[in-house]
Image: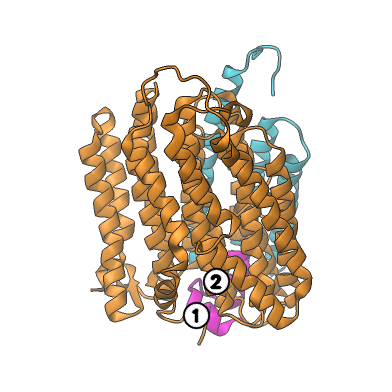
Amino acid sequence: MNQSILYVIAGIVVVCIGLEGILIRPGWMKKILGLNLFGTGVFLILIAFGKRAGKECDPIMQSLVLTGIVISVSVTAFSLTLLQKITTSEPGAKEKKT
Amino acid sequence: MNHCLVFPVVIPLLSAFILFALGAKINLFFLLFFSLSSLSSTLLLLKNTLTFGTMKYHIAGWGAPLGIDLYSDGLSIVWMLSSSIILFLIVLYSHSYWKSKEHPVKIKQAFYPLLFILWSGMNALFLSSDIFNLYVTLEVLTLTAVPMVALSDKRGALLASLRYLIVAVCGSLFYLLGVAFLYIGWGTLDISLLAQSIKPCPLSWGALGLMTVGLMTKAALFPFYFWLPPAHSQAPSPVSAILSGLVIKGPYYILIRFWNTIFLDIQNPLISYCLGLLGAIAILWGAFQALRQDRLKMLIAYSTVTQIGYLFLFFPLASGNRSVWEIAIVFALAHAFSKSALFLVAGNILCVYEKDTIAHLEGFPPCLNLSFFIFGLAGLSIMGIPPSGGFVGKWNIITILCKTGQIWWIPIIVTGTLLSYAYILRVVRYSFSPKQSQEDRKNPISFSMNLVALLLAAISFSMGFFFLPLLDLLSIGSPFGQ
């Protein structure tokens, strides 16, 4: 019980770090990393919730997180490709790095 | 007969894969075949719903607490029907649009598979009765809508699509947290089971807050609208029509669905008022911004911000009287049809001019005459002139406001309407300006492009005539209570 609360708190901290990256940090790379952290924090909270719900680990929560991870990977891959396209299309691409 | 619930999801998805495999061999025959079969799968479901009433399908025979259910009632059928009609017409339009100008072939190859996956995701969203499945469909919409914005290779479009992606995924993750709250509290993901068992407690209020914030970000309500105008205006015109007409309505549909099932007993009037207030700010701010834009597609995109404001104004109205939601649906559908018509007309104009700067429309060539007429016709619904769907919506809002004595909303609606007259007429007035000397140029706008836009505009304009049968269809399964 205590352990899972610890994980929930850790998840909330990771979510906050991710949101900070998205909302405050300049630069697209930081925002994409922030998005990733946000997602990871949400998954951590979900897994910790699954442990709290019953004595055993809840398999449904784990399958939800698995689906979420698949979506998160494709979002990250796509956003990185997009960012690469943006930086190469930039006129002075060499000097200005994100 | 229950199996017909699966077809609207599976057929567009299969079509997308086949179109992807066809690649450069995509032609009008294939497009017609696949879009007609997708449309007819929706029509088959409509026919069965009219005969048998609501239907439920257990995927793979698992059933509700563990498996995923598809469920169709009046609410989902009306949305599916309209979105299928709009997507079908846009497939026809885009075929001519890609041909009209020098577009690289790879745009066409990427556009159609994405469009059909979006179609499938849209239908799945309207049919799902599982809150996690709704999260997946939201992500399907995001991951098809964002690449479609990035189809036009301009740097501005790429930046707009990256911003759109980040905001939309943030919204989905907030929604996912809400899903986790509901699951931990009541141990199920099925909407109808949740609606029966949910009780007011901090956990359900947390879920309500997280889901509402996530969904209103994705629907572009006022403080979170900033991603919408660049993304919708930089995309190729058929894509803008899909995004503004349909994609932002997906999250709005989920909000309506939840407000009438899961959150029915735990909602607080204060939250409804906050949503209504944000909607009111969006109405004024969006219209004000639309007046200031010098590019046509930016103007239309800000008009979407305004119209989303009206849609959220229904939340405080419906807290005492749930039949108000029916009017909200009619208003949202009228906006879907008229807004896609407006963006398609903007596409016609972009075929003739290089840029869509509004000031350059002075003395436009005669091949644009019909396009301007369509712009005016679709604009009538945005402004709210009878018998359009926009009129039905606004008229009913004001009537309900007078009956319930909440008259302080009325000045906002009237001001918003007057501002919408101003920004629509800013474009339409060029029809009355003297024509400049005409150089002989080939008409780049094909017949089907005008026809599709005209059909969409005509449907939104004449919605006042068939809105009673629409309400009958909506009441199947009484999604808004008796």
Q: Horizontal and vertical percent for residue B236? A: 48, 34
Relative vertical location of residue B240 with respect to residue A16 in this rendering, above or below: above
Q: Horizontal and vertical percent for residue B209? A: 69, 66
Quarter of the figure with the N terminus of chain B: bottom left
Would you say residue B189 sits in the magenta stretch? yes
- Image: magenta residue range: B178-199
For marks 1 and 2, the one nearer the N-term is 1
Would you say residue A32 sits in the magenta stretch? no
* Viewer-closest of B168 and B198: B168
Asked which secondary structure carries label 1, the reply is helix
At label 1, which amino acid type do we have? Leu
Q: Name the tint of chain A in the rendering.
A: cyan
Asked which secondary structure carries label 2, the reply is helix
Identity of the residue furthest to the front in this view = B434
At label 2, which amino acid type do we have? Ile
- The subunit letter for the residue under badge 1 reads B
* Viewer-closest of B367 and B154: B367
Q: Nearer the viewer, mark 1 or mark 2?
A: 2
* Viewer-closest of B183 and B328: B328
